[in-house]
Amino acid sequence: MEKLCEFLATLVFLGILFHGEMVSALRTKDGSEEWGYVQVRPKAHMFWWLYRSPYRVDSPSKPWPIILWLQGGPGSSGVGFGNFKEIGPLDANLKPRNFTWLRKADLLFVDNPVGTGYSFVEDSRLLVKTDKEAATDLTTLITKLFNSDHSLQKSPLFIVAESYGGKFAVTLGLSVTKAIQKRKLKLKLGGVVLGDSWISPEDFVFSWGPLLKDLSRLDDKGLQISNSIAERIKQQLKAGQFVNATNSWSELEYVISINSNSVDFYNFLLDSGSDSATVSAMKLKLFKEISMRGYSKHLTSTRYSPGVSGDLYSLLNGVIRKKLKIIPEKIRWFEQSDNVFTNLEGDFMKPRIAEVDKLLALGVNVTVYNGQVSVPFHNSLTIYL
């Protein structure tokens, strides 16, 4: 009977007895970390992980911020990649990271959209098809977290994103602003920060060829082919043929790769195919998957070498899974969800520039940056990280 009571108490704490109406969560004894699931829709469960900074300095004139980190992909895990590979307190070897962003803010990671990382759906038909659907789910998660925690409401929330996460950040910013205005969400939005964001795919595909030609990574023939595909993408976008545009984007990456010795799309000084002799031999019909993985930064040697130093797959399905305790047994963590990407391929090439304009018109602070240079819009946010 005693063990049964303990078990029931655990269920109540996790929110399981409330059929998803209560946030399912656990925390460390010192309260420095919290994590859990929110049922954002029936049978759709989103995982989140909050770090409270040990460097926190409370000031009435400058309240301590919370950063919500949104990963790209779409379908790349922020709980894994953003946390352990970029800005979290520990690196992928569980060593302290000296330049963690916790020095300047609390950090909230999510596996977004549902189906990404530890997040899951009980029916694959529940995977989102649009950025706006993803924003609705994220707004539900944020509302359940912030409305039930007065301490979170004291800190301004900054939505910070990279790559495709920038599209999520823009639509989420609009959704959150609307929820705040309707008094459905108790939150102060500090701003939206878009890092190397995929908010204008057309501009990206037209810039790749000329840039690589200037850097001697493409010859005249490669530039001509890439420019012709970019022009086709422009016409497909104009005609509303968004899935076709996504397929053409895959073809463009393939053409650039085979004409540039497999240039790394994240560092043109490197060859992404240097660890694989098969990239140039890939048939075009198979390259869409390779492009997707390359775009989301998940096609790495560690991904295919379980057990090596810094291997996220082994880490998140091993010691981290044991620490968290609440990950369902059937859920396996992957750095990139191909199913999430496939379901969003109709939205993948759609721009989000107009939505950025809407954010600015609403008075939301927006910062856009690429590489190591910050290029803010007017109404820009200043946040020192």
Image: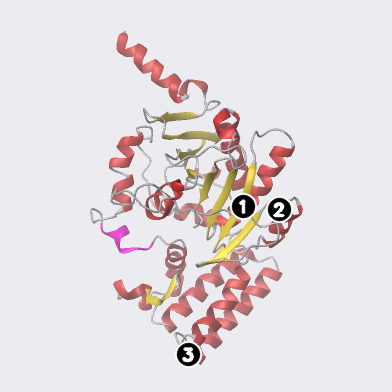
Query: Residue drawn 65% across and 66% down?
Result: 241
Residue 196: x percent and y percent? Answer: 54, 64
Residue 212 shown left or right of residue 3 in the figure = right
Query: Residue drawn 51% across and 49% down?
Result: 69
Query: Residue drawn 68% across and 74% down?
Result: 235
Q: Identify the disc placed on residue 359.
A: 2
Q: Which residues are magenta?
A: 299-305
Residue 166: x percent and y percent? Answer: 58, 57
The residue identified by callout 3 is: 219
Residue 244 shown left or right of residue 37 in the figure = right
- Residue at the limit of the structure toward the top, as seen here: 1
- Residue at the limit of the structure toward the left, as seen here: 307
Crowd around label 3: few <14 · some 14–19 · many ≥20 (10 Å): some
Q: Identify the disc placed on residue 19.
A: none
Nearer the N terminus, badge 2 or badge 3?
3
Q: Is residue 276 visible?
A: no
* SS at badge 3: loop
Query: Residue drawn 48% across and 74% down?
Result: 253
Crowd around label 2: few <14 · some 14–19 · many ≥20 (10 Å): many
* SS at badge 1: strand
**Which amino acid, by three-letter code, is at mark 3?**
Asp
